[in-house]
Image (cartoon, helix red, strand yellow):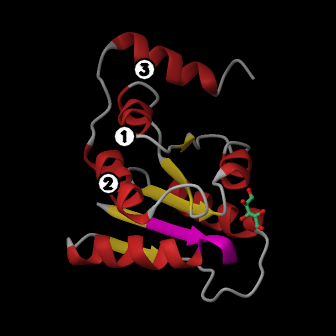
Amino acid sequence: MEVFIGSDHAGYALKSAVKDHLEKKDIKVTDLGAFSTDSVDYPDITREVCEKVLEYPGSFGIMICGTGQGSAMTANRLKGIRAALCDTEFLAEQARKHNHANVLCLGERSTDQDLALKLVDIFLETQPDPDERHKRRVDKIDTVC
Ligand code: RB5
């Protein structure tokens, strides 16, 4: 499993915690910044994370900003990216099962660290539901718009 991770300044601390958490589990993590709490614009880092996910099929992206909202809005502009802003275990599971999400967005200011790490684990461990109806709907995301 390969994970590309990024944040803006407001997600930097949580990004560092998520990165450590994944590395302890021997998961390959590529950190695309931010590398400090100096102010940066979340669309720039989100784009870098998503481009890597598209370049390496089967990989995952994790993008963290203050709320996760701006990251999710940006990520979902890229065709082939299915980004899910999750703040409950149910959402993290469903995002993978039914929506085959490939990018998880988190908010450092809205989700505490313990829950965020749990959401990351659920997101990465949950397999897409293979039922045809879910695949059909996921495929339509890229064709109806
Ligand atoms: C930065 O202050 C904040 O606006 C940003 O991290 C994010 O929450 C946007 O969605």
The residue at 51%/24% (across/down) is 138
Residue assigned mark 1 = 89
When asked about the image quadrant of residue 65, the answer is: bottom right
Q: Secondary structure at mark 2?
A: helix
Residue assigned mark 2 = 118
Residue type at tag 3:
Lys
Residue type at tag 2:
Lys
Q: Are marks 2 and 1 in contact (CB under 8 Å)?
A: yes
Q: Which circle, 1 or 3, is nearer the viewer?
A: 1
Q: CA distance from mark 2 to mark 1?
A: 7 Å
Find out if the beta carbon at label 3 lies less than 8 Å from the nearest ligand 1 atom: no
The residue at 49%/73% (across/down) is 15
Q: CA distance from mark 2 to mark 3?
A: 26 Å
Residue assigned mark 3 = 135
Q: Which residues are magenta?
A: 4-11
Q: Is residue 145 left or right of residue 134?
A: right
Question: Of marks 2 and 1, which one's residue comes earlier in the chain?
Answer: 1
Q: Is residue 89 left or right of residue 25?
A: right
Question: Does residue 8 show up?
Answer: no
Instruction: Count the labels in the image.
Output: 3
The residue at 62%/25% (across/down) is 141
Question: Of marks 1 and 3, which one's residue comes earlier in the chain?
Answer: 1
Residue 51: % across, % down: 61, 60
